[in-house]
């Protein structure tokens, strides 16, 4: 069970607030043995769990805490089907998720999350 915080986010059109969206946030801990803490937005319109990577150099990533895959002994690189990435795999599978405000591009990792 993760305690959630609720925030009302205004939807603004032509300078006027026309509605409010509800956003739910909570804290999770990722990786072992030293879990990395993150405050995450639970997106009810998606089944994805997305974290900015330490390898990301964009301005958007720089504004947030980043997941350091190398710091976690429990992280396992996987392909989109959940199978482990093998040494014979030339390239890793990538995922692209498009939201109303932009796009996220990344790799798949199986990880321990509390």
Image (spheres, rainbow, N blue to C red):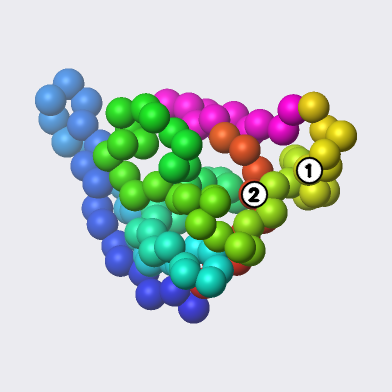
- Which secondary structure lies at badge 2? strand
Left or right of residue 81, residue 8 in this image: left
Q: Residue at x 63, y 63 (%)?
A: 74
Residue receiving disc 1:
85
Name the residue rendered at 82%, 48% in the picture. Answer: 83
Q: Nearer the viewer, mark 1 or mark 2?
A: 1
Q: Which residues are magenta?
A: 91-105
Relative image position of residue 107 (x, y in whole percent): 62, 38
**Which label sits on residue 109?**
2
The reply to whether residue 43 is visible in this rendering is no
- Distance from label 1 to label 2 (Cα)? 10 Å
Between 22 and 84, which is closer to the camera in this rendering?
84
The residue sitting at the right extreme is 88
Q: Is residue 95 visible?
A: yes
- Name which of mark 1 and mark 2 comes first in the sequence: 1
How far across and down, in percent of the image, does residue 50 sit? 51, 46
The reply, left or right, for residue 104 in relation to residue 65 is right
């Amino acid at each position: 069970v993760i305690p959630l915080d609720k925030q009302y986010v205004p939807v603004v059109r032509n300078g006027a607030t026309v509605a409010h969206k509800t956003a739910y946030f909570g804290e999770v801990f990722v990786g072992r043995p030293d879990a990395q803490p993150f405050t995450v937005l639970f997106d009810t319109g998606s089944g994805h769990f997305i974290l900015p990577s330490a390898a990301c150099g964009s301005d958007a990533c720089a504004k947030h805490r980043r997941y350091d895959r190398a710091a976690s002994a429990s992280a396992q690189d996987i392909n989109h089907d959940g199978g482990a990435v093998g040494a014979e795999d030339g390239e890793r599978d990538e995922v692209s998720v498009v939201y109303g405000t932009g796009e996220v591009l990344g790799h798949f990792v199986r990880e321990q999350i509390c």
